[in-house]
Amino acid sequence: MRHLAFLIISIFFTTLVLKAQLPNEVLVDDEQVSHDFFFFKDLDIKGNYSVFTQGRFSVNYENKELNTTFLATYLTRNITKN
């Protein structure tokens, strides 16, 4: 339970410092706990460049071999005004 509290506090302060969209989801069931997050932020004032990150961390309570990690980061370039 201590790890979950640390995770929630870390997410809150990261959102405040980076001033970015950072939706989060924590799923808890009888077999595992999962944390999904997305991060989106423009890198310049005009919004021509931005970064998008998607991640998922899952921890199985009984079998550590079933733990999973997924992290993908994309750099995007807007080539039109819309």
Image (spheres, grey):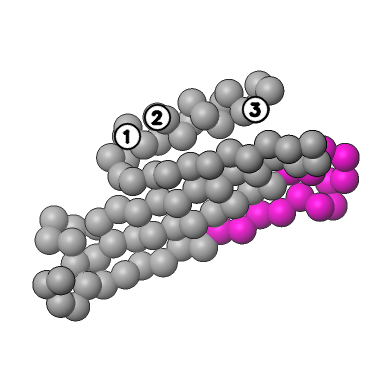
Give the mark, 1 or 3, whose residue is nearer the N terminus.
3
Counting from the top left corner in percent of width and height, residue 55 is at: 54, 54
Q: Quadrant of residue 5?
A: top right
Q: Are marks 1 and 3 in contact (CB under 8 Å)?
A: no
The residue where tag 2 is placed is: 13
Residue farthest toward the right in the current orientation of the protein: 62
Which residues are drawn in magenta? 59-71
- Give the distance between the C-alpha atoms of the residues marked 1 and 2, in whole angstroms: 6 Å
Three-letter amino acid code of the residue under disc 3: His
The residue where tag 3 is placed is: 3
Q: Secondary structure at mark 2?
A: helix
Q: Secondary structure at mark 1?
A: helix
> Residue 61 in magenta?
yes
What is the number of the mark on residue 38?
none
Nearest to the observer: residue 63 or residue 17 = 63
Three-letter amino acid code of the residue under disc 2: Phe
* Quadrant location, the N terminus: top right
Q: Which residue occupies 49% across, 57% down? A: 54
Q: Which residue occupies 34% across, 60% down? A: 51
Question: Quick check: 55 left or right of 64?
Answer: left
Q: Secondary structure at mark 3?
A: helix
Q: Which residue occupies 84% across, 52% down? A: 65
Q: Are marks 1 and 2 in contact (CB under 8 Å)?
A: yes
